[in-house]
Image (cartoon, rainbow, N blue to C red):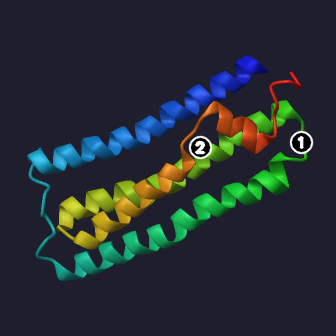
Amino acid sequence: MEEQIKRIVRRQKWLYALLWLGSVVLIVAGEIGVGDWQGMFAADTARIYYGETLVILLTATCVPVSLKLFAWVMTKKIEPVTISKALYLYAVWSNVRLALLALPLYSGLLLYYLMMSNKCVLCAAIALIASLFCVPGEERLRRELNIDRDKE
């Protein structure tokens, strides 16, 4: 079981780093001007309106859901099962939580560079800040699943 915990934590840290690395790559590509996609829709007010609305709605739904859904799943679905099943469910729902945070993050950054809209980058920043509440680690996994080192 100890090896399974270490493998889950290693994978979660890798996915978390990938979330941040992807946003850094997108920011660098947008700032140094890779391609001709920056500001492509900056003059189209209808697209800006729909894009901003989409990103704001994604942020307003995905960020709270990613944080509260995981807490709800922990109490309702993960705690009543065995340790090995709980570890599997923890990994799956942690991935779901990161995917929910990646939606407003990447769409906000992409639409910011396409439309040059500050509202989109603000929503991406909200998603990045919310991801700080999801930093994976072995101690966090043990605390959330109530696994003591002494029990093993």
Callout 2 secondary element: helix
Q: Is residue 76 above or below residue 86?
A: below
Figure check: 71 above or below 93: below
Looking at the image, which is closer to me, 38 or 122? Answer: 122
Amino acid under label 2?
Asn
Horizontal arrangement in the rendering, residue 131 relative to residue 142 (left or right): left
Image position of 89 with respect to 124: above or below? above
Specify the amino acid type for callout 1. Answer: Val
- From the viewer's side, name the closer residue of 13 and 139: 139
Rendered residue at 57%/26% (across/down): 10
**Can you give x and y, in whole percent of width and height, for residue 36 in the image?**
9, 52
Mark before the other along the chain sequence, 2 or 1: 1
- Quarter holding residue 146: top right
Q: Residues within 10 Å of mark 1 (few under 14, many from 20)?
A: few
Residue 86 percent location from the top left of the image: 80, 38
Q: Residue furthest front?
A: 150
Horizontal and vertical percent position of residue 97: 58, 51
Between marks 2 and 1, how big is the CA–CA gap?
19 Å
* Residue behind mark 2: 95
Residue visible at 53% across and 48% down in the picture: 98
- SS for tag 1? loop
Task: Say which residue appears at 49% left-offset and 72% top-offset.
Answer: 60
Q: Residue at x 40, y 73 (%)?
A: 56
Judged from this view, the residue extending furthest toward the top is: 3
In the rendered image, the quadrant that contains the N terminus is: top right
Q: Residues within 10 Å of mark 2 (few under 14, many from 20)?
A: some
Residue 79: percent from left, percent from top: 85, 47
The answer to whether mark 2 and mark 1 are in CB contact below 8 A is no
Tell me if 62 is positioned left or right of 77 in this view: left
Numbered label attached to residue 81: 1
Position of residue 131 in the picture relative to residue 143 (left or right):
left
